[in-house]
Amino acid sequence: MSILVDANTRLLVQGITGREGSFHTGQMVEYGTPVVAGVTPGGAGKTVAGVPVFDTVAEAVLTTGANTSIIYVPARFAPDAIYEAVDAGIALVICITEGIPVNDMVPAFAWVRQRGARLIGPNCPGLITPGQAKVGIMPGFIHAPGPIGLVSRSGTLTYEVVDSLTKVGLGQSTAVGIGGDPIIGTSFVDVLGLFEADPATEAIVMIGEIGGTDEEDAAAFIRDRVTKPVVGFIAGQSAPAGKRMGHAGAIISGGAGTAASKMDALTAAGVGVARTPSEVPALLRAAMSA
Amino acid sequence: MSILVDANTRLLVQGITGREGSFHTGQMVEYGTPVVAGVTPGGAGKTVAGVPVFDTVAEAVLTTGANTSIIYVPARFAPDAIYEAVDAGIALVICITEGIPVNDMVPAFAWVRQRGARLIGPNCPGLITPGQAKVGIMPGFIHAPGPIGLVSRSGTLTYEVVDSLTKVGLGQSTAVGIGGDPIIGTSFVDVLGLFEADPATEAIVMIGEIGGTDEEDAAAFIRDRVTKPVVGFIAGQSAPAGKRMGHAGAIISGGAGTAASKMDALTAAGVGVARTPSEVPALLRAAMSA
Amino acid sequence: MNVHEYQAAEVLARYGIPTNEGIVVTDPEGAMEAARTLGGTVAIKAQVHSGGRGKAGGIKLAHSPEEASSAAGAILGLDIQGHVVSKVLVVPGVDIAREFYLGVILDRPNRRILVMASAEGGVDIEEVARDRPERIIRVLADPALGLQAYQARGMAFDLGLPSDKVNGFASIAAKLYRAYVDEDATLAEINPLILTGAGEWLALDSKMSFDDNALWRHDGIEAMRDPAEEDATELDARRAGISFVKLDGSIGCIVNGAGLAMATMDAVKLHGGDPANFLDVGGGASADQVAKAFELVTSDPNVRAILINIFGGITRGDIVAQGITEALGRVTVTAPIVVRLAGTNAEEGRAKLAEAGLTAVETMDEAAIQVVAAAGPN
Amino acid sequence: MNVHEYQAAEVLARYGIPTNEGIVVTDPEGAMEAARTLGGTVAIKAQVHSGGRGKAGGIKLAHSPEEASSAAGAILGLDIQGHVVSKVLVVPGVDIAREFYLGVILDRPNRRILVMASAEGGVDIEEVARDRPERIIRVLADPALGLQAYQARGMAFDLGLPSDKVNGFASIAAKLYRAYVDEDATLAEINPLILTGAGEWLALDSKMSFDDNALWRHDGIEAMRDPAEEDATELDARRAGISFVKLDGSIGCIVNGAGLAMATMDAVKLHGGDPANFLDVGGGASADQVAKAFELVTSDPNVRAILINIFGGITRGDIVAQGITEALGRVTVTAPIVVRLAGTNAEEGRAKLAEAGLTAVETMDEAAIQVVAAAGPN
C-alpha cells in the first residue's frame, strides 16, 4: 500500500514536449512509472519516451484512461492546464511549475476543491511511491520501499532526508512534496490524514519551513487525529523576518511563520523535532520503538 | 402540508423601506405571513408594518432567526442582495425584482446552487401557501387552501387561474410563480418534484409560456417521475417569432420555444392541456377523477 | 437591443478581433467614393436589423466604383423583412479559403453562456443546428471563471484546424466571449469567420444584440441605437412603461400582465379573431397608463375593436374601471370596446363601466367572443 | 516587489480612491517650492521601502516653506532600517476627524483574499492584530466572484460608521480590493484611511507590494521599481536565476534548493557559526551558476569561509564537482572552501574535488563543523 500514486496510476504528462516535460517523462518511464499519455497542444501524433502525445487532456483521457496528471507547462499557462486536467476528469493533478502568480491560484484552488479533485503543488517536486510510481522530478534511486510516510514543502531537502532514511534501512511508503508556494493544493494536514489511514505507513516524517501556519495546523491535527509516530524538521531556524528564502511561501511576515513557533507547536503535539536533517533517522527509530 | 413556505416560515424582507417593499410587507403581514425582519442598509432601528429593520441580512438572521427572504431591491442591487441572503444562511430566497441583467444572473444562479440554497425568480410574483404564508405580491384573497399545486412563469395569468380554481372549490396547496426571465433559480421541474413529494398536493397545474425549453423539460419529467394528475396551459399560442412578449424570457428564437412545441410535449406526457385558462378547472376535475 | 453589422464589427474590433473594416454610406455616390478609396473589388452590404440579407438581394459584389454605385442604388430602399435599407456598408473584397461559424449566446437550459463553433460557416446556423447538430461544437463557460483557454483551444482542435491555426482561433473565441460578457450582449456572432487565402483570420460578418436590462451600464451601446430601425410605437410604449408589440390583426388588446396578455391574444385567436397587438399595461392600470394604451392601440388603422382585459389583484377593479372611464374622457376612441374585469371588486367595476356605456363582462372567453363579433368578419 | 508610498497612492488614485496628492522632491529647495505650491501646513514624508518612518523621524510637519525646507533637510539622508532616504513626499496638511485601517492581503490558511478593517487606524496593525484581535474586522472574498458589495457594506456597519458614511467606505474597500486583484498585489493597505473634519474620506498613507511572479503582465508596476531601494547583489543574483539574501554572518553558503539552503544555514548556526547569506543556486549547479554564486558570496567582505552544500539528484555529483573546479578556475576565491557533496555519484565527485585540493565531506553536519572552524571565532 501507499498513498495517492502506485502501480495503478495511469499518468498523463502535460507539457510533455517541453524541455522539462520530455526529460522527466524519460526519467519517470525509466523508473517504471505507468506513464500512459502526454499532452502538448499541436503535438498530437508525436511520442516522447514511447509515450503518445495528444492535443487535449480530454482526448488523452478518453484514449488512454489516464487518472493522474503531472504539469510541466510554463507558469503563465499552468493554471489553464490545471483547469483542463480537472475538467477532463483527472482526479489527482501534480503541478511542478514554479512561479505561478498567487492571484491565479486563488480561484484555481477553490475550483479544484469544488470539483472534488486533488491538486499537489504548484512549485513542488511531486511525489513517489518507491518501486511503483515516481511522479515528479526527484531522483528515484535514493528511495526504497518501506514503512515511512514523508511529506515536505521542499525539494532537495527532502532528498537529503530520504537518502538518510534509505541508508539506515528505513524505506518509504510514499514521499510527497507539497510545494513551497503561498497557496498549495494539498497541505500537511491533508497528507497526514492519508498517511494515518494508510496501513503501509508506520511512521511519518514532515519537513516544514518558515512562512504561513500550515505546520501549526499540522501540529494541531497530529495532536488530535494522528496515532502514528511523527518526526518533524523545520528549515529556516536562522532566517530573518521579512525576507523571502527562495520559495515564494518561505517568508516570516507580521511576526507569524517563524521556525520557533512551528517547532514549539510540533513539540507540544508530541512530535519529535530534529534540529538538523541528520537527526531525523534516530528520532524516527526512537519514536517507532517507543 | 404544502411546499417551500408555510406557518414555519420566518420571512425577511430585503429592501423593506422601499416603495414596493414597504407596501407588500404590509400586505404580507396583513395576510398573516410570519414576517420577522426587514433589511435596508442604513435603516436599522426603523420598523415597517411592525417589522424591525436591520442594516445587514447577517444581523437580521442572527437576531430573528429568519429562514426565508424576499427581495424587493432595484435590479442593479438585487444580485448583491441574493448573495447577501445566501451567505447569511438563508435557504430560500424569493427575488421579485424585474430587469436584472442576464449576465449578473449567470454567476448568481451557479453560486446559489453551489451553496445548496434555493432561489425563486427573479422577475416573479412569489409564492403562497393559502392560509399560512403569502410570500410575494399576489392578491391573497383569491386563494384558498386545498389540494392543487400550481406553478407558473406568469403573474396575473396565475391569478386568473387561481381565481377560477378557487371559485369552483379547488383550493391550492401552494402556488408558485417561478418568474419570466431567461435565467430563473427554480424551474418547473424543481417545483413539480416538490409537489409530487408533497402529500397535501393531489393534482398539479402548470402555466407556461413561449420561450426556452423549460416546459419541454417539465413534460419529460412528468412522464418519468410524476404520478399525480397534471393540467397545463401555455400562453403565447398566437405569438410571432423573434418578438419578446413582455417577459424577458418570453421569446421564440431560433425556431425553439413555441407554444405548439410545449403543448405537444405536455400532451405526449399525458398532461391535459387547456387552450384557454377557463378550461383548466374542468380538465383538472376530469384528471383527478380519472 | 440590436445594432447594425458595422457597429457589431466596431465593438469586436475594440476587443482585438480582426474585422473587415469598411465604410458606411447612405447613397450611391458615397458607395462609389468608398469603392474608390478601398480599391479593387468591394462588397456592398445592406445595413438593416434583419437576417436574410443575402437572399433578399441586400449583398452585392462590385468590381469597380461604378458597379459599386449601381449596386448601392439597387440595395438602398430595398425592403428586407419589413426593414427599409437606408445605409450600406462598403467593404474590401476578401480571398476566402475557409469559412467558419463562431457565436456566443445564453444557454437557457444550462443557465450558462454557450460558445458555439462550426466548420460550416457562412450558412444559417439554425439550419445546421437542426439538420446536422453534430457539426456544431458547443462549450459551456464556467459561470464565474468564464471561458478557459483550454476550452477555446479544444474547440479549434475539434474543428480540425491545423496546429498553426489553433491559437489564432482560440484567441478570437476568447475575445468574442469577453466582448459578450463585458458588453452585456445577448448574442455575439461571427458568421462567417474566415481564413483568407493568406492564412489570416478575419471576421467577415458580425452580429450583436444587447441586454436591454444592462444598457444603463454601457453608454457606448445605447449610443449605437438606430431609431430608424426601431418601431416608433413600441419605443413610445416602452418609455411609458408599457410592453407593446405590433401584430397584423384587427383586434386591439389592452391587458395587465404579460402572461395574461398572451393568453388574451390566444383567446381572441381561438374564437376566430386576430389580435392587432400584444400590450401589457403594467401593474397599476391607472388612468394615465390606460389612456396611453388607448393611444398606442388606436394609432393602428387596422384596429376595428378593442379588448381590455384586467385582472384586479392588489389594484381594485373599481379603481381600474374609473381609470378606464377617465382615460376615455381624454382620448377619443371610435372602435367598439369590450372590457373584461375580474378579481378584486370586479363587480363594482363592471357596474361602473356599464354606467359609462361600456360593455363589461366577467370572463375572458366571453369577452373574446364579443370583441371578435364587434370587429366583424376579416 | 515594493513601491514607495507616493507610487502606491498613484495606483490607488487610478482606481478612484481619494488620496492626499503631493509632490515628490529630492532636496530641501524642492520641498520649499512644493510647500509654497501647496500652501498652508504640509507634511514631509520620507519615501523609503521600510516601515517605522514616523518613529525614525522620517515624517515631519511644516507650517511654512522655510520649515518645509529644513524638515526635508533633516529627513533626506536619514538611514531608516538600512534604507537611506533620497526622496521625500510633500503633502498638504489634513484635518483628521477619525482614522481607520483598511488592508487587502492573502489569507494563506484559507487560500483566499482577505480584506481587513479597523477603527484603530494610524497605528501598527500587527500590534492591533496581536493585542486586540477583536478590533479587526475580517472578510474573505469569494475566490471567483470577488468582494461583494454587501461584504464591503457589512464592514462599514461593523466599524460602527454612521449611515451616511457607509457607502463611501464600502466603495473605497471595493476599489482597494479591485486594485489588489487587477494589479496582482500581495499587499494593498491604507493606514490611516481618514474621515476629515468635513466628513470626506481620504487615503492618507498607502502601501502596496506586488507579486514578482506576475510582473510580466503589468508594465506599469515594473516601471515603478526603484533600483536605489533594491539590494544590487540580490538583483544581480535574481537575473542569474539565483535566490540570494544577504545576512550578517561570516560564512558564505552555496546550496542547491531553497529548503536545503535554509537547513544549511541552520546547521551552520547550530554548530556555532553565522551564515553570511541564503543562496539557492538552482537545480543544475552548472559551472556558470557556481561561478556566479562564488562572485555573489565573495563580494561580501565579511565572508571568511565558504560552505558549498550540494545534494546530487538528477544532476550527478561528479558533474557538479567538475562545475565547482571549473568555476574556481574562473573566479578567484581566497576564503577557505568546504564542500559537502551527497547523492548521485557523490563519491566520485568528492574524489574529484579532493584532487583539486578542496575539502570534500559527506555529511552536512561535518561540513558545517569544518566551515565554522575554518572561519575562526567571531
Image (spheres, coloured by chain):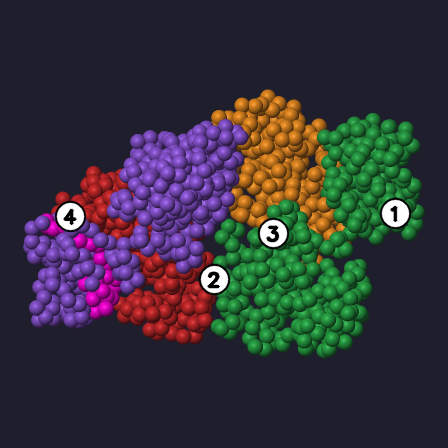
Chain colours: A red, B orange, C green, D purple
Residue C326 horizontal side relative to residue B98, left or right: right
From the image, tell me which residue sits under label 4: A275
Q: Do labels 4 and 2 share a chain?
A: no
Q: Distance between the residues labelled 1 and 2?
A: 56 Å
Q: Are marks 3 and 2 on the same chain?
A: yes
From the image, tell me which residue sits under label 2: C150
- In the image, is residue D230 part of the stretch drawn in magenta? no
Residue B135: image quadrant is: top right
**Which structural element holds mark 1?**
loop
Residue C93: image quadrant is: bottom right
Q: Residue at x 90, y 46 (%)?
A: C304
Is the C-beta separation of discs 3 and 2 under 8 Å? no
Q: What label does residue C184 carry, if any?
A: 3
Mark 4 closeness class: few <14, some 14–19, many ≥20 residues within 10 Å: some
Q: Are marks 1 and 2 on the same chain?
A: yes
Identity, as a three-letter code, of the amino acid under mark 4: Arg
- Residue B116 screen position, x and y as percent: 50, 42
Q: Which residue is drawn at 67% across and 62% down?
A: C6
Identity, as a three-letter code, of the amino acid under mark 3: Asp
Label 1: chain? C
Q: Distance between the residues labelled 3 and 1?
A: 37 Å
Bounds of the magenta span?
D271-294
From the image, tell me which residue sits under label 1: C303
